[in-house]
Structure formats: C-alpha cells, structure tokens
Amino acid sequence: MAKKKSSKKSDQAELPLDATPAPEPKAEAKPAPVAPAVPAAGPAEASDAPKRKKGQKVQDDKAPLAQSYRNWFLDYASYVILDRAVPHIDDGLKPVQRRVLHTLWDMDDGRFHKVANIVGATMKLHPHGDASIGAALVAIGQRAWLIEPQGNYGNMLTGDEAAAPRYIEARLTNFAKDVLFNPKTTTWQLSYDGRNREPITLPAKFPVVLLEGADGIAVGLSTKILPHNFNDLCRAAINHLQGKTFRILPDFPTGGTADFAEYNDGERGGKVKVRAKIEERSKYLLAITELPYGVTTESLIESILAANAKGKIKVKHVDDNTADKVEILVHLPQGSDPEQVIQQLYVFTSCQVQLNPAACVIVRNAKTGDDKPQFLGVRDILKASVEATRELLKRELEIKLGELEQQWHWDSLERIFIEERIYRLIEKSKTWDSVLAEIRGGLKPFLKQLRREVTDDDIVRLTEIRIKRISAYNRFQADEAITKIEEGIKETKANLKRLTDYAIAWFEMLQEKYGKGLKRRTSYDEIEQINAAEVVSANQRLYVNREDGFIGLNWRQHEFVQECTILDSVLTIMGDASLKVSKVADKTFMGLDIRHVAIWPKEGDTKFYTMIYRNGPEGKSYAKKFQIGGLSRDKLYPLAKAEGSRVVYFEVSDKEKDMPKTVHISLDGRSGARVREFDFDLTPVPVSTRTSKGLTVTKWAIKEVKRNDLALK
C-alpha cells in the first residue's frame, strides 16, 4: 500500500529554481537519510507509544511494511531537501539545474540547440518530467550568466512566459565553461538507472549561488538567497584571499532602492526593504522605472488598481510601456499631490516590499561524507566557495604538472630512441620479448637523463612510433618542444608555491573578462517607515443607518457623517448603552439604535461624554460624565451595569468646560411621581471612566431630557 502511494506522487513534475518543490521520490533515487530540521515523528512512530490491551497481539516489527512506514517521512523529507529544493554549496546548483548544465556540456558543439532537444537529453539523468527541466532551463537562461538564450525566453520584468521549448534555443556561455566544467576534477556517480554517469557536483570555481540567487521550499525548511553583483563578488573573493574584511550586499536585476540595515548577512531573521524607483514627470504624471525584486509590472499594476478600488489612493489610469526597460506611467486626477501619491504607492502597493532572506545550502561533512542542510551567512558561503576554488585550482595545477612531466618523459625517451638509433637493435629480433629486451638494453646508458624509471608501457609506446615519423624527425624542433614543456613545468611549480596569488589572479581574470560595464543596479539607502495614517487621503464618505445599526462607505441614501480615510475606525454608541469601535468598510453592523457615531481619533479620544440612562428595564436613572479611554476594535463594551438599560440623554463635548451644567427632566405621566418636571444639576457629577455608575437622577421613568440652553432627546 505504501508503494502505491509513493508511485502516485512520483509522477508529479519537479519545480525548478525559485519554485516550490513538492513531489515524492522514485524508488531508484534513495538519498542517504539525514537529520534535517523536520518534524520528529510521523503517524507510524506514534504507534509505538500506546499501551497494549489485555489479550491484544503484539505487532510484529519484522512485518514487511512496518519499517518502511516508520522511515517513510524522514526519507521523503531528506530526499526533498537534498535532491530537489536546496542548492549545494559546492556548485550552488540544485540537481535539476546541474543536470541541465551537464547535458549542455555533453551536447556542446559551439552552436545553439533546441530547448526541446536539451530537455529530452536531460531526462536521461532527471526522471521527474520535462516540465521541471524546461522551467529550470528557462529560469537560468533569463539570467544569461550560465546559459545563453536565443528566442523568446519571456520577460522577467513583465512576468511574460517563454515560448514553447520547440521554438527557443540555448547553449552554454563561455563563463559557464570557464567556472563550472573540468572532467579531470569532477567526481562522478551513476545516473538513476545506471546507464549514464553524472557529476555529484560540478567543480565550480565561482560562488554561483550568490550570483544567481536561489529559492526553494522543502519539508521543514526553506531557502532564500538573494542575487549579488558579479564585480562585488570578485572583489570580495580577492579581499578574502588577501586576508581583508569584506561586505557583500544583494544587487537585484530589477534595480530599485534597498535598505540593508537589517540584512543580517543573509541569515534567518534578516529583513531587506526594497522600493521601486518613481519619477515625477509632471504635476499629474508619475513614472515607475525600476521594480522591487520579485515584483513584475503586471503584479505591480494590479496592486495599484486594487488600492485605487479600495480608496487608498486615487489614480486616473495606468499605462504599461515596459519592453527592455521598465516604464509604468501613473496618471493622477486633477488636484492630486504627486509627493503624497508617491508615499501612498510605497505604503499601499507593491512599490515597496520586504524580503526575508534565509541562506540555506547543502554542506558535505568532510569526515563522514554525508550531506546536510545548513543555514549560513552569505559571507560564510563566499568564503567556503573561495577556499574550494583555491583547492580546485591547486588540483588543476597538480594535474597539469603531472601531464607536463609525463609528456617530457615521453618526448625525452622518443628523442633518445631516435637520435641514438636504438630502433635498429630490434631489426633481428624474432620475438616480442626480445624486442622489449633490446630496447631496454639500448636505453640503459641514457637512463640518467630521465627523471623517472622506464616502464614496460613506455617501451611499448616506443615500438608504436611509425617509420615515417622517425625518418622526418627534426632534432631542433624536438629540443624546442622539450624546452617549452620545461618552461611550463617551471611555471606550474611556481604557481603551486604561490597558490593564493594564483587564485587572486584567477578572480582578477574573471572580472576583467566578464565584469566590464556591470554596475550595480540596486542602490542602497535608508528607507524610513512611512506612517500609512499620515499619507492616506480622506477621500471616503462615511454614512450611517441608525435604525438598522449599520455604517458604511458611500451610501448616498443614508445619513452622511463625515469624510474619512480607508484606514479610519468608527466609534458608535447605541441606545442600549453599549459602545463599539470598528474599522470603516463598505458595510458593517455596529448595533441597533445608533445614538452617536464619529471617527475614532488615531492619537486617542480626548472628548467628554455626558449620559443619562435607565439602569435595567425597571431600574433607576443615573447621570454620568466620562471619557472613553483605550478600546479594542470590534469588541462590545457596556456603559451601564445592568442588561436592558436604555440611554435617555447623551451629549459629546470637546472640552470639559463645555459640558452641560443643568438639564430639564420630564417624567412619564403614568409614573406615580408628584413632581413630574424638574431641573437636575450636573455639576456634582464627576468626570470618571466609562465603567462608572454615576449619580442617581430619579427612580421614576423619564420621558424627556432637555439641556437648559439646547433641546436634546
């Protein structure tokens, strides 16, 4: 049953770089279990804990599927982390990217190849469907550092998709050939079906993961590495090799202005604020010319139109003229303030975004050889990459030195064999053994001229020299070739002794060859937090339906209250002596019989309230003066002690001195009171909190209350 479940998931296509991988592994590609930060126990593990009832049979741990279920979750989590979602620190690539690049290397003949052909060839190594391969290839090609695209590869700025694989072409860039490939230093493994071999990791001599950036979501963890400028990385690598301190900051292909004050070296918990570049072309025309990273012109325009529909900003219309460069024109209505609209765009639209980096890479343990995910800072990643580059350069020099010394040995043997006419000694030999013995004997007087012993393979190689080559042998040219090899050996040994200088020269060469004109696209500056309440426009109209208890925006058929903003909150006091604060919306129920409605001040309410209420259905009436104080939104607060209370008089004053001093009270004619009309002095009533009970006014039912100078019900 477990096997059947696994096969269903394995048919899903793997997602490429900057996407969310989710499928399940196939049976052929089982990674070594690791211990990543994933949930500790699955359902199967929990089955070990419950106690066994009396007479219940003990589960056999040797059952065929028991162990599979027990380890399934950990195996799956390990697989997604190691083989799908997270790049390896050695070459900065995910498996699908590595296989695409390796296939391009195998196919490379200097010409472009159809992407459909590349995808088909890559499937020999990557058994998870053509969609993931094609998407990964297009994503790398859009950046153009490792794959040179030809045709319609979509547009990173607008979000347009690439053409079908049969219409577009690709080939490796010279940069990729220089920094990623060397079969002599590559460690190989068999492909999933054992028919081919593929690199475990490519021998990368540059921090590709920092150049390209990476996104991935695995089981229990995710990675987000922001892209960096090529020249910045080269300079940082040189500074590290020279023992100097360095700092590297992201550089986004879409430009923009970023605040790296809380970047935290790209580790978890860091924050990067990125803003679009907005120009004021005229009084009523704004132009967006650079985008925040991860935002397309389509998504940005959608956020502007959504904010406009909600009343957060006011724009006339938006035009998108983006091609090779971003140009979004925002037309403003008459009377708009361009500076305020720019601030509103930063607050209410995708013109400003916050990125949360979390640099996670796969790191191989040098002792055990196990791969595990690890969270590192970008400086640590660069240092590890530079040290790995130095070791790779050392291995290449050692291989080159061995090849030069071998070539010197063969050329020296050949010169002795021909110049000393040793080949004539084998003319009368009748057996193969005698041929080898004659040559070995002929070489004996000259062995001191050589740098190592002569092997049987060396002698066999001498017998393979053709007569035509012996007859055309030129001693001067042979000496010249050997001298050139000796110079190469001397230079290689010198580079090995000065390995750090050689590595510095390597990065300087890369910067000179590929870094010309590559200036930073993202400027960095401190971005101040904008208070949304200060920049939002009061372009909404608040209405109230007192009888039904609703408030809303732009209800022309109901009672107008005042102008407001989309961020405002509304205070209402109902006839049952309850109070509520809610955010303005198209339509919100506050409570029946609304007696008072007003915008709740953002800086705190300072008004003074006078209220006379009947406490409970048959209770006494009380007078109270109060200030409201702090409130929570959408919570109902009682202003009276008993349920069923009713407000008979309510007034709001801006200042305490403006509060009513006396009121004229008329009692219900059906009450048993002898005096049915009288004045009540409110001066003794102290200003207290909203929860105070107040002073008793009368025990009889009140018909009407009037202020002596104003008639209010």
Image (tube, rainbow, N blue to C red):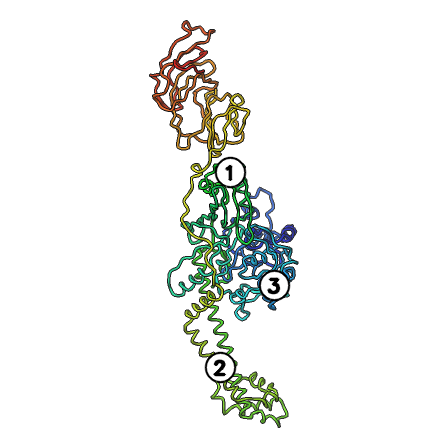
Is label 3 in a helix, a strand or a loop?
loop
Quadrant location, the C terminus: top left
- Residue 354 at x, y percent in the picture: 47, 47
Q: Count all numbered tags in the image, as a single digit.
A: 3
Q: How far is disc 1 from disc 2 in space, using C-alphas?
A: 77 Å
Pointer 1: what residue?
333
Is label 1 in a helix, a strand or a loop?
loop
Which marked residue is nearer to the observer: mark 3 or mark 2?
Answer: 2
Q: Amino acid at mark 3?
A: Ser
Disc 1 or 2, which lies upstream in sequence?
Answer: 1
Q: Amino acid at mark 2?
A: Lys
Is mark 1 in CB contact (under 8 Å) with mark 2?
no
Judged left or right of residue 590, residue 683 is left
Q: Residue 191, labelled with which disc?
A: 3
Disc 3 or 2, which lies upstream in sequence?
Answer: 3
Q: How far is disc 1 from disc 3 in space, using C-alphas?
A: 62 Å
- Residue 358 at x, y percent in the picture: 47, 52
Residue sitting nearer the eye, 204 or 239: 239
Pointer 2: what residue?
484
Q: Amino acid at mark 1?
A: Pro
10 Å crowding of disc 3: few (<14), some (14-19), many (20+):
some
